[in-house]
Image (cartoon, rainbow, N blue to C red):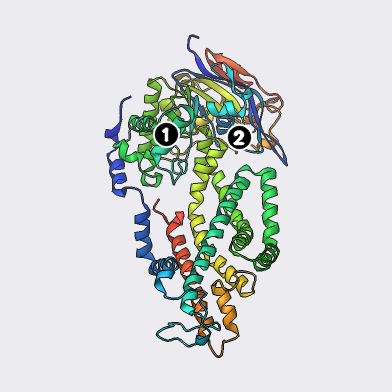
Amino acid sequence: MEEKNVLEIRQLRTSFFTRRGEIRAVDDVSLDVREGAITGIVGESGCGKSMTARSILRLLKYPGRLIGGEVLLDGRDLTKLTEKEMSAVRGGEISMIFQEPMTSLNPVMRVGRQVEEALRLHRRLSAREAREQAVAMLAAVGIAEPEKRARCYPHELSGGMRQRVMIAMAMICKPRLLIADEPTTALDVTVQAQILRLMKELRDNGTSILLISHDLGVIAQVCDYVYVMYAGRIVEHAEVCELFDHPTHPYTRGLLGAVSSLESGSNTLQTIPGVVPNLLHLPAGCAFSLRCGECRKGCAEHLPALRACAPGHEVRCHRIGEVNA
Amino acid sequence: MKTTNTVLPTEERLASQIGEAEGPLELFARLAAENKLAIISLIVIFLFVLAAILSPVLTPYRFDEMDLSQRLKPPSAEHLLGTDEGGRDVLTRMLYGSRVSLLVGVVPTVLSMLLGAALGILAGYLGGWVDALLMRLADIMLAFPTMLLAMVIMYTLGDGLVNIFLALTLVNWASVSRIVRSETLKLRESEYVEAARSMGVSPMRIMLRHILPNCIPSLIVLFTLNIPSAILTESSLSFLGLGIQPPNASWGLMVNTGRQFLYTAPWISLAPSAAIMVIVLAFNFLGDGLRDVLDPHLKKS
């Protein structure tokens, strides 16, 4: 493949050590973020997508700990950096935007200053240059009257504008990688569409993006490549068209089946039976076997490996041979 | 990069209707509109401050000017609030006493706020053994009755204004640090601190730029509510003879000396008592008003 990867995650493991046992929030996750593309991670709440993102930036909270694997940013292993070197990476080379635009901005700091903050930390700039760049960045993310808005406090801006400010904050140092953790979940649909359009613009201007969402619609709209996570593991990954045209893992098929469609003609919404399993008591084998309609003998006992079922399309299921046949 | 301004007409219009940020003046206007009592209190406090500063100009007497021919005179044209047992003008002594009261109200409160806020933020943000150490220390301070602790400190250090400052600072920092710590614990988990961390902002800078400014509303309220308690503590200490010593003037001291003449010359005690009451109430009302106005939950969101 000639495409370059900005970020390569190899066998990443993150666990929470609680009184009741070890919770494997991220279990043996390997993924690549291609340069100049949007890579998506999709899955239900609690499947480990946000923890994967936090592990990349090493922003885990106690009792969470990164216990293995590599996070390679342009070949440099972030897990081996000192905390000080990591501070230079955060915001400088990788930045992150969060789910809640309403609470992710400091309420007593003017938004212009917040956008400048990363710039002042990572680039040695005069106050005036920093201000100018911040205003230019606000304009670039589609905020009208950026000089005026820069002097506003967060409570004076709407949700969509705040998310734009968050994106401006994240993009101000021109990072190699932007991690967007559910960037549109808290926004209403029209604003969501605008933010997604902005993310696509950023990609077209060369930014690599790792987009985390539980919303298949969002993934389908903007992503180039998709990873599906379940119970801390990647169960399927493929190019976006391939994944939506040929979903192979029973879980992926279940997810797609659960999206209501106007064309299907069916009035009842399909669901995946059961609930997300307790991460403390996972079966030894396939974690989805508890809910899988096609579960066979041995599924719950032996962990399937990720195997290719088509070029660039890998699935973690014992039955891929049979399903495709 | 192409801008997408055109797709956002409603959003932008709404935002411009909300208008500019709220400055101190707007805050003051809102306080005036919502709470008349707080504004009256503010004016009262301002008058006291003015009287304290201008006391040499406002009165023809000196605070320690004795005139034994004029002992225990009731209020009259020469002595508006009468004279005490040494023939000193009560109003003059009250004016000079207000300097002590205001200084004792403000200086140790500021010191204990600075100390308490710094230790509270460190304890709350860093957690672990720093938190355990600082908070056990605070618990020990809080375990003593305030007045008793202040008396012990004054007894050990000896009297004098500077020692009163020290005693009140030592007595008050613990409760401030407790409040700031709990605020910090809440803010530490907030998304914007998280976001700041994800931008590579250092812990020191997060504490100073992100956590401290968000504690300020609570600190302002705490400030206005701690001042009257400091004034009261000083009055009590001086009343008990552990604070300001004669011939210097302090309201607490005046109440104490007037005690013996309560039946024959009640003005000696009553005038400073009234002053203590008025200034303490004024600060309390102002504190309440500010708390209502500064409460972030009541702010437009």
Classify mark 2: helix, strand or loop: loop
Q: Is residue A23 something that shows in the picture?
A: yes
Q: Quadrant of residue A318?
A: top right
Residue A73 rendering spot, x and y as whole percentages: 55, 20
Sequence-wise, which precedes: disc 1 or disc 2? Answer: 2
Q: Nearer the viewer, mark 1 or mark 2?
A: 1
Near-viewer residue (B192 or A240): B192
- Residue type beneath disc 1: Glu
Q: Position of residue A217 (x, y in %)?
A: 43, 31
Say whether mark 2 and mark 1 are on the same chain.
yes
Above/below status of B98 relative to A95: below
Confirm whether residue B38 shows in the render: no
Residue at (52% x, 14% y) in the render: A312
Residue at image position (30%, 41%) is B12
Query: Looking at the image, which residue is at 43% across and 24% down?
Result: A174
Q: Residues within 10 Å of mark 2 (few under 14, many from 20)?
A: some
Viewer-nearest residue: A248 or A294: A248
Specify the subunit that label 1 lies on: A
- Up/down of B47 relative to B170, above or below: below
Mark 1 lies on a secondary structure that is helix
User: Which amino acid type corresponds to the residue marked 2 in the rendered image?
Assistant: Leu
Task: Name the residue carrying label 1.
Answer: A116
Q: Nearer the viewer, residue A196 or A154?
A: A154
State the image coordinates of residue B103 (x, y, percent, origin top left): 52, 63
Q: Residue furthest bottom?
A: B264
Q: Nearer the viewer, residue A178 or B156?
A: B156
